Image: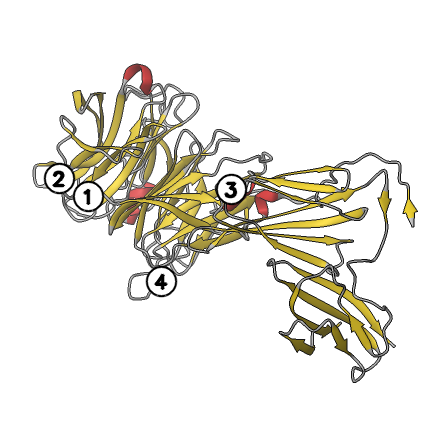
Amino acid sequence: MLCTILALTFVIPAKAQNSILDISELLLENTTYSMNMTNPWGFTFIADDEIVYTEKVLGTVWKLNLTTKQRNQITGGPVSLNIGQGGLLDVVAHPNFEVNGYIYFTYAKSEGSAQTTAMGRGKLVGNTIQNYTELFRALPTFNSGQHFGSKLVFDNDGYLFMSVGDRGTGSNAQILTNYSGKVLRFNDDGTIPNDNPFVAQQGAKGEIYSYGHRNIQGMALNPITGIVWAHEHGPQGGDELNIVKKGANFGWPLATFGEQYGGGEISPDTSLPGMEDPITYWVPSIAPSGMAFIRSSQNTNEVDIILGALAGQHIHRLLVRNDKVVKATKSFSNQGRVRDVRIAPNGKIYALYEGPGKLIEISSATERCSTFIFSTIGNSMTIEGFASIPNAVLSYDLGCDNIDVVTVPIPKSMNSFTVNNLAPGTYCVKVDAKNASNVFWCEKNTAVLITATSVIENKTNEPYPNPVTSLLSIPESIVASGYVITSVLGERILQNDATNRQIDVTSIPTGTYFLTISHTNGKTSTHRFVKM
């Protein structure tokens, strides 16, 4: 029968979803840069494909080109002290690095028989840091190898934030006359901003921005709000994620979810009036380290965070809505201790492992799936974006009812694939993509409406008759290699690998069934039929 349908062809948007909260995708390794790194601790991007990274124990600084894999040692940087948890620590490029060339470092420093955390900067010229100057030293010093911190991050106004650990003595974090257990805030030259919260308070250190921290090992700037976030190690349990607030007390050690090493209470309180509660906490500890915000289209009340885990030995991802964690996932389990995570200027995500020492590039499946483009013309649907995907399978389902689902493997040499002769209606379309190792790459779902101006409606490619009483026939147009008949409950009723086109259904009870035909070209098609 000739059906004339006068309508426009267009794509129906997929059911409204918040893609930021959809983290069914994994974070998958793309490229590993193994450069015989020795205890790498921090890294910063100075270009899309070039980083500067530090080695804690040796106190060495390196430049690594991610495109050429060429590595060069940088000279002229700070002289650090390797003791316990202290050494050459974080590194960050000035926001205006392309103009001024400034690189900032934090590191352990000795003063007499005691130690502390220091911060300084120099100008990177070629493979040399020129005119390195120490801008700050956290006093008083302590004879301890614990909790030096230290992380660095610039905000959008050019202020430099630096974390310093409590140096192993929790009470330090509540005292404003020292720098331990604090987040500090500087102008880019190391001087104190006039609007720091304790500048005018007698006896308090003017550099202090917030206090009550134990040992911050990750800080990053929320790109939506421009506010610094940080996470810190708890003692035994009680790692915390916090939004850093001006003049705020974050509670350590008076309020904590952790306990003494080996057991025993530190505080009966997990929350106290006048102190900030964490956004989330980890019990048992994962020892979070490094942090970055994944760049994507977000509302102001949503953030998408990726961080490393030292003790947990995995990549951790958090989805936060209205300052509450709504999803958490982990990937790359048991591949090593993840020390730092950063976002390149071009949006790529990288993670630095301290043991074994390596840098990996990782990607979000959501970002990868964005390469797929769906379009329709008449009775045809075209999907583009397969060029970078070694293995992909396309599935489409007329009516979105999981009936008559067709699956098609996409040839590896193709960038686009077109399905022709589609009947009018709404199709649910899905692309399953896998990498060269045949491991999940991404999955994208959409809905497509097919209309046509002149479509001959026929059943030449459908099994017949339907309903059926005894013999169900597969049409000559289908080159089949086998079939499976299942009930509506998914129970397998009949299966045959032969190419016999006559299927005897006499013994099947009356009811509704599904016939799935395997085609010799790799396709499968599912058809509903009724046994009378």
Give the camera-side residue of 254 and 355.
Answer: 355
What residue sits 81% from the left and 76% below the top?
471
Q: CA distance from mark 4 to mark 3?
A: 46 Å
Kindly indicate the quadrant of the structure image that contains residue 134.
Answer: top left
Kindly indicate the quadrant of the structure image that contains residue 381.
Answer: top right
Q: Do residues under tags 4 and 3 come within 8 Å of each other at their CB atoms?
A: no
Q: Which mark is residue 368?
A: 3
Q: Which mark is residue 38?
A: none
Q: Is residue 346 left or right of residue 493?
A: left
* Mark before the other along the chain sequence, 1 or 3: 1
Q: Position of residue 523 (x, y in %)?
A: 63, 58
Q: CA distance from mark 4 to mark 1?
A: 27 Å
What residue sits 76% from the left and 47% below the top?
422
**What amino acid is labelled 1 in the image?**
Gly
Of badges 3 and 2, nearer the viewer stands: 3
Label 1 element class: loop
Q: Which mark is residue 81?
A: 2
